[in-house]
Image (cartoon, coloured by chain):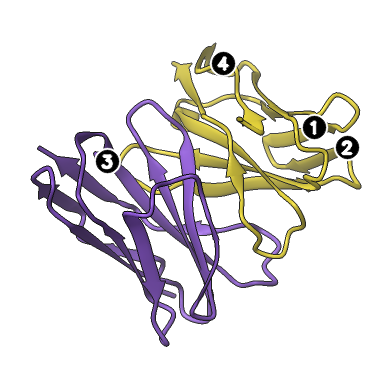
Chain colours: A yellow, B purple
Amino acid sequence: DQQVKQNSPSLSVQEGRISILNCDYTNSMFDYFLWYKKYPAEGPTFLISISSIKDKNEDGRFTVFLNKSAKHLSLHIVPSQPGDSAVYFCAASVGNAGNMLTFGGGTRLMVKP
Amino acid sequence: EAGVTQSPTHLIKTRGQQATLRCSPISGHTSVYWYQQALGLGLQFLLWYDEGEERNRGNFPPRFSGRQFPNYSSELNVNALELEDSALYLCASSLVAQAYGYTFGSGTRLTVV
């Protein structure tokens, strides 16, 4: 039973345009959500997070939106840059105090120059 | 500050053998998590250790085991290796009270032949 799903395995976007990565979850107990970015041969690195008390969190070019009623979150990257090309994982946890993260399957983003 | 370090970087084993993977967390982090990323799949939760105790384990057979030492470093042992155990094994550490998720190491690539 996959509690966190990323239904798009890959996404291709032109440089300068918006990238939108989507994530759905089923466990209503999840109240903290994170996005990680992973380059080949490296471990995932933390990108941005959002608590369930918010519906939007912004950090530079990256914005995460949370729709609790739909159990859906999305990551927007504007403008997209070739260096953003990586695999993006969404993750969820109950609480944000270092509890176990449940990851989605990842979306490979390719930003074309 | 040194990051999460994992050793070895690569490991080749024969089916039926045992593999031992090691992880050193960031100084001060007490929680260590192990994840498996098989080819084309997302991160699957394996084990969570905190303060030397196993706190949770994922849906993996008992031949996947580990431990956490008094200095908070950790070992993952995989007994009776099978071909499908070939994967990238990622270790992450966190402070229990950390609000931003884990810090991952670069992983150990285990190949079973």
Residue A55 is tagged as 2
Q: Earlier in the sequence, mark 2 or mark 4?
A: 4
Secondary structure at numbered mark 1: strand
**Of marks 3 and 4, the one in the foreground:** 3
Q: Which residue is mark 3?
A: B85
Q: Amino acid at mark 2?
A: Asp
Name the quarter where the N terminus of chain B is drawn.
bottom left
Residue B51 shown left or right of residue A38 in the figure: right
Give the residue drawn at x 52%, y 29%.
A105
Instruction: Return the residue at label 1.
Output: A65
Front-most of residues A55 and B75: B75
The quarter of the image holding the C terminus of chain B is top left
Q: Amino acid at mark 4?
A: Ser
Whichever of labels 4 and 1 marks the residue nearer the N terminus, that label is 4
Compute the Cα span from label 3 to label 2: 39 Å
Mark nearest the camera among 4 and 1 is 4
Amino acid on which disc 3 is placed: Asp
Left or right: where does residue A57 sit relative to residue A23?
Answer: right
Q: CA distance from mark 3 to mark 1?
A: 36 Å
Vertical order, A24 against B97 (above or below) = above
Residue B61: x and y in percent read 39, 48
Q: Are marks 1 and 2 on the same chain?
A: yes
- Asked if the residue under mark 2 is in contact with the one under mark 3, i.e. CB atoms within 8 Å, the reply is no
Q: Chain of mark 1?
A: A
- Find numbered disc 2 in the image and state the secondary structure of the residue it sits on: loop
Image location of residue B99, percent across then percent down: 71, 62
Q: Are marks 1 and 2 in contact (CB under 8 Å)?
A: yes
Under circle 3, the secondary element is: helix
Residue B77, percent from left and from top:
28, 61
